[in-house]
Image (cartoon, rainbow, N blue to C red):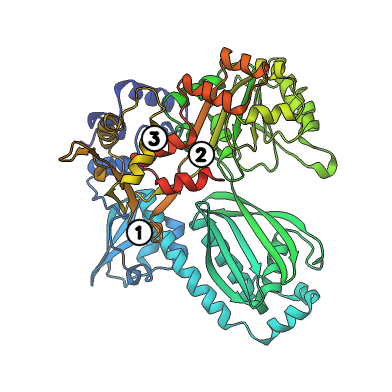
């Protein structure tokens, strides 16, 4: 056992196949990366499988922190900053010992640092855990610390704050790093990061300052502050965003950057004057897509194959459509990672650059100085690109340049704001693009939305109501040779075989005494991990329209989007709602979520 490596152990367990073992060995031989790093990057084993393997190899016990009951009294004995720094969790306490979950059980410095928080004779029993488990416990603890820090900071707010509210200029003289308002702002930002919020809204109301977070697409109020703090909080945000604190009449835009768990998070700031004071909206932008694959977006089956094939051609246009916040940028960034190669020159034009992709030349659009999408694209084409990603096609000039770029041997990826995939065609025609040019350049059209994912920790089945079964059956009946019972009889065992969390509760359809199928749907009962909402995270639902020869001819005939969509379905296209319903049947989301996002 001592001679066995992580790679050979995972192979013996049937987790990594022999061909993949060879790939890992080749990569470790030609790079400074170790086996574990390569295995993670290739997605050959998940964190729990790796942790379990290390537990067996090193004879160190494993603990699943996602299922363990960790008391706050145990966590509070060690400062949260120390737990975050060393990525450890004390999860069980006895009189003379403490059980410590670690990502690296051989990190002696971490063990010694934690030891100092306990009496000298306390024994530290080391356990291995996963990054997800450690993050979950620490993030929960951070939320509790935020609440207590805001409460404590408010206790130190006294009369001078009232003076600040009346005299904005005096804010320049305040030591914001030590002021209570700075602690409040820091706590708000930390909560936004750990709750995976996409936006923070700081809104002055008539009698209070409302703080709301957009979490998984849903706006939720989490904090209410005294109205007297509004000018101070806004001014603190202006200072860190390099905005003018004495300008309260005009809108302002800025940005700043945070670091959390070695990850850089760009935050875009918009300040808008209102009748009750200045409102601030902050958008949190992921810096990179490390570890995120195109396969993880929710694209799958024939839709995934069509989309992937469209990325491998040397020229043409691939468009991803949907409203703001539907995941278009993430899909395109994942696509760039998928096709990125040292032998390919990829350049992107974005406003803003939300996700930083290593190896891709990314350009920030700045209309104030004349760097628009159109001007930028015109210049980019002189940089010898193979692939160009344009953040959004907004006007006729950009659309024409995108078409010309594809005609001259470039693959162009971009986005449009339309409700469906087929609707992109009339939208481009309205911009003045000739039908014959669209027919010869557009390769693939994608529409997408992001419904919330049912929490994998509290997911539970329930019999689908008759009305829901009717809705599902009617919608899915247009898929050729589709039978809902046969589909689930094949899909559910395949999902369970993968061993993913929550899969064990999935149920195959049954037949009642009248010969009718009994189908299960799924919901989250609500737990600590999802904040009681029953949902955690989001998953994409897609429709992918392959522009084949028949559809190209239809474009030149100036037919409607509905005609194009109907023709695409004859060739097997699954609509966005159908994709959502299939994922609801598999327990990934709910019918309610599919209908909610489809109306956007």
Q: Earlier in the sequence, mark 3 or mark 2?
A: 2
Q: Secondary structure at mark 2?
A: loop
Asked whether the residues under the numbered discs 3 and 2 touch, taking CB atoms below 8 Å apart as contact, a structural biologist would say no
Q: Secondary structure at mark 3?
A: helix
How many residues crowd mark 2 within 10 Å: few (<14), some (14–19), many (20+)? few
Q: Nearer the viewer, mark 2 or mark 1?
A: 1
Whole-number angstrom distance, CA of label 3 to CA of label 1:
30 Å
Q: Nearer the viewer, mark 3 or mark 1?
A: 3
Q: Earlier in the sequence, mark 2 or mark 1?
A: 2
Residue 5 vs residue 50, the one in the foreground: 50
Q: Quadrant of the C terminus?
A: top right
Whole-number angstrom distance, CA of label 3 to CA of label 2:
40 Å
* Residue at mark 2: 290
Q: Position of residue 228 (x, y in %)?
A: 67, 79
Asked whether the residues under the numbered discs 2 and 1 touch, taking CB atoms below 8 Å apart as contact, a structural biologist would say no
How many residues crowd mark 3 within 10 Å: few (<14), some (14–19), many (20+)? few
State whether residue 340 appears in this view: no
Q: Quadrant of the N terminus?
A: top left
Q: Position of residue 16 (x, y in %)?
A: 30, 29
The residue drawn where x is 33% and y is 25% is 21
Residue 367 vs residue 444, the one in the foreground: 444
Q: Nearer the viewer, mark 3 or mark 2?
A: 3
The residue drawn where x is 65% and y is 72% is 205
* Residue at mark 3: 474
Whole-number angstrom distance, CA of label 2 to CA of label 1:
30 Å
Q: Residue furthest right?
A: 369
Q: Quadrant of residue 47?
A: top left
């Amino acid at each position: 056992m001592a001679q066995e490596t992580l790679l050979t152990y995972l192979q013996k367990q049937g987790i990594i196949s022999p061909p993949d073992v060879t790939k890992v060995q080749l990569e470790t031989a030609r790079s400074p990366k170790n086996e574990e790093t390569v295995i993670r990057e290739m997605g050959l084993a998940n964190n729990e499988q790796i942790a379990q393997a290390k537990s067996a190899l090193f004879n160190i016990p494993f603990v699943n922190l996602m299922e363990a009951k960790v008391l706050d009294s145990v966590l509070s004995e060690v400062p949260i900053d120390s737990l975050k720094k060393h990525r450890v969790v004390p999860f069980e306490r006895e009189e003379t010992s403490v059980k410590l979950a670690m990502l690296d059980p051989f990190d002696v410095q971490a063990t010694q640092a934690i030891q100092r928080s306990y009496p000298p004779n306390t024994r530290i029993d080391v356990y291995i855990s996963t990054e997800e488990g450690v993050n979950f416990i620490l993030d929960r603890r951070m939320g509790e610390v935020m609440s207590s820090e805001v409460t404590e900071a408010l206790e130190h707010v006294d009369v001078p704050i009232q003076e600040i509210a009346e005299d904005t200029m005096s804010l320049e003289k305040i030591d914001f790093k030590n002021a209570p308002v700075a602690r409040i702002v820091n706590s708000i930002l930390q909560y936004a990061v750990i709750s995976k919020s996409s936006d923070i809204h700081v809104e002055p109301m008539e009698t209070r300052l409302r703080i709301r977070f957009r979490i998984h697409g849903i706006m939720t109020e989490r904090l209410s502050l005294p109205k007297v703090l509004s000018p101070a909080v806004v001014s603190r945000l202006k200072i860190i965003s390099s905005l003018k604190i004495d300008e309260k009449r005009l809108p302002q835009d800025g940005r700043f950057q945070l670091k959390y768990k070695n990850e850089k998070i760009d935050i875009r700031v918009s300040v808008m004057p209102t009748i009750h004071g200045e409102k601030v909206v902050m958008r949190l932008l992921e810096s990179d897509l490390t570890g995120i694959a195109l396969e993880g977006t929710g694209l799958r089956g024939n839709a995934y194959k069509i989309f992937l094939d469209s990325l491998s051609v040397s020229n043409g246009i691939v468009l991803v459509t949907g409203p703001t916040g539907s995941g278009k940028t993430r899909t395109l960034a994942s696509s760039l990672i998928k096709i990125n190669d040292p032998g390919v020159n990829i350049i992107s034009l974005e406003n803003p650059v939300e996700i930083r992709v290593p190896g891709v030349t990314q350009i920030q659009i700045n209309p104030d100085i004349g760097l628009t999408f159109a001007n930028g694209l015109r210049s980019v084409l002189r940089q010898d690109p193979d692939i160009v990603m344009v953040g959004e096609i907004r006007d006729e000039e950009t659309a024409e340049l995108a078409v010309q770029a594809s005609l001259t041997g470039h693959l162009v990826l971009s986005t449009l704001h339309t409700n469906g995939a087929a609707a992109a065609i009339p939208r481009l025609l309205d911009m003045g693009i000739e039908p014959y040019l669209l027919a010869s350049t557009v390769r693939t059209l994608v529409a997408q939305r992001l419904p919330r994912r049912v929490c994998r920790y509290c997911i539970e089945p329930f019999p689908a109501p008759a009305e829901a079964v009717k809705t599902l059956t009617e919608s899915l009946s247009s898929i050729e040779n589709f039978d809902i019972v046969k589909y689930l009889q094949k899909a559910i065992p395949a999902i369970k075989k993968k061993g993913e969390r929550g899969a064990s509760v999935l149920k195959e359809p049954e037949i009642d005494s009248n010969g009718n199928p009994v189908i299960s749907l799924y919901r989250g009962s609500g737990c600590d991990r999802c904040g009681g909402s029953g949902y955690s995270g989001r998953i994409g639902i897609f429709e992918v329209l392959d522009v084949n020869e028949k559809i190209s001819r239809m474009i030149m005939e100036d037919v409607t989007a509905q005609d194009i969509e109907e023709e695409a379905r004859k060739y097997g296209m699954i609509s966005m709602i159908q994709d959502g319903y299939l994922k609801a049947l598999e327990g990934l989301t709910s019918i309610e979520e599919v209908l909610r996002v489809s109306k956007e």
